[in-house]
Amino acid sequence: MNYQPDRSKYPAKKADGTLDIDLTSGKYLKLWHGPNHPGITGNMSVELTVCGDEVVEGKVHVGYLHRGFEKLMERRSFIQCFPIVCRICVPEPDFNEYCYAAAIEELSGVVVPERAHWIRTMILEMGRINSYLMYLGGQAGALGQGVIGQWTTYVRDLMLDRFEELTGARIYHMFILPGGVRDDLPEGFKERLEATLKEVDAVLKDVNDVMFKNAVFKRRSIGVGYIDPAWVDEYGITGPNARAAGVAKDVRKDQPYLVYDQLDFEPVVDHGSDIYTRADVRRRDVAMSVDLLRQILAKMPNEGPVMAKLPNVLHWQIPRGETYIRGECSRGEYGFYLVTDGSRFPRRVNVRGPSYTHAMTLLERMIVNTNISDIAALMVSLHTYPPEIER
Amino acid sequence: MMHKLYENLGKIIPLGEMTLQRANLAFITLDCRYLRSALHHLRDVEGYSHLVLLTAVDWLEEDLFQLTYLLSNRTADMDVGLRVMLPRENASMDSIHDIWPTAATYQRELREMFGIDFPGSPRVNEEFILEGWQEIPPYRRDFDTKKYSEENFAHREGRVTKDPASHMKELLYPDRGQ
């Protein structure tokens, strides 16, 4: 196909705003990218209309793993929802636990002990590193660098070891509960976490040398998948996707929660707004999380309770009310909107995952006029997880 | 701050009650006719440029749907939720996709999951997640998940439950009996 320099005029639109495409002409082709495709971010698919190797329209289809989390939670007592909330986001489950627990605490007036705040912050930063490591492997893999995924999986596994010794589980932890955290740190945990952080540092340096200085990676990612800063508010873009577009959105700094106001950091911001910049912002974010974890380990009080006294959670009735609790997860603003009616069950739980805004409307906007070969890298660069869309 | 915002907004449109959840989060009830004016004012004048979420709550007993439009002013660290109550029967609401393009996705989901219509919203009648759904919208409180699964899926026998004390005795010491 001859490359069209002015892609904005291609193809024409009809009076009603739809594209003027005649599939029977042979010029255009319908192509399904996913739902199970190595270059895709989980179980979702994009229905593409292509002309040669150029995408002229893309429609996102989700729902392949819908388990009705929000509906299930309406039929369970507040404490019974914890095995559900952590499953909404597999690589970073602790965020759901924190937001949901904090929403319950606010509506029921439970005061969390100081030390639990520090442990929660530590867990969230550990989860952030896990999530980013998985992303870096996926981003490099989408552009043919499989070895990066092997390195990041190795070091992520070490981090999962720390989670296992802390919580008893590698993936779904259920460690953050209303009132605090389930248990105190095991003996020697700080030293072992510090040793793991050293490994993360070392792998991060290798990733920087091999992935970010690689000519192929640069040529495939610089200038590709541009997000206009003006779209940030229009499409509700948050987190690294906004920060790579020069918009310094970080809930940890803008609306500090837990102990972030006692830590010294500046959100990573860059201006390239392409695949390369988004990946680089995340790489620097991992380094920042390592630094934050070291600060937490140094400043954390060594003694004190980690759980508040709660009523009998099996018969816990929470007064009528509604609230929204947010935090900055590895992909942007994560929030739980919880409505209670005074009964033993939540009236309504709405999960505001960053993937919802990034992978639906934004992706459909971005995918037009890209090349088929860039789609996998483009999708991964938005760092989305489908369970957050089809909660 | 929130009381000032409530005052400013009240000068333009009639408002219902305000619930101050915490210093930087308030929920304000208003009539659906004034929603778009309120959103325009909050976005363009008060700096609430970020649409955090749009969702519905089913108050079945009161025969009402509550739509919550949660907006955020990042620089001032303030959040406000606008609550709009709609009758459940043939619920319909003005689309706001022209104010925030991302709202179109929320509205599509609400159409499918709660049956609330947003005339004019892009692809609002296209299937979002469910395919060939014939029942009432599944996120409504009167949709009975248990009844639906019993009618549509085959029953699978559960595992046999045994009393652990006697079962382990039987396994470990078969000669000794009970």
Image (cartoon, rainbow, N blue to C red):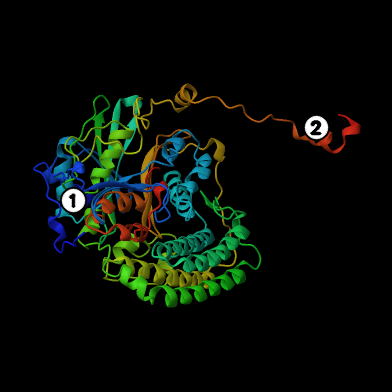
Q: Nearer the viewer, residue A137 or A291?
A: A137
Q: Which image quarter is the N terminus of chain A in?
A: bottom left
Chain for numbered disc 2: B
The amino acid type found where label 2 is placed reads Ser
Q: Identify the secondary structure beneath mark 2.
A: helix
Q: Are marks 2 and 1 in contact (CB under 8 Å)?
A: no
**Residue at 53% across, 44% down:** A83
| Residue B166 marker | 2
| Residue A15 marker | none
Q: Quadrant of residue B155?
A: top right
Q: Where is residue A110 in the image (x, y as percent from the top left)?
A: 48, 48
Chain for numbered disc 1: B
Q: Which of B102 and A76 is in front in this view?
A: B102
The amino acid type found where label 1 is placed reads Leu
**Residue at 75% across, 35% down:** B164
Q: Identify the secondary structure beneath mark 1.
A: helix
Q: Where is residue A314 in the image (x, y as percent from the top left)?
A: 56, 37
Q: Which residue lies furthest to the left in this view?
A: A15
Q: Quadrant of residue B54?
A: top left
Circle 1 is placed at which residue position? Answer: B42
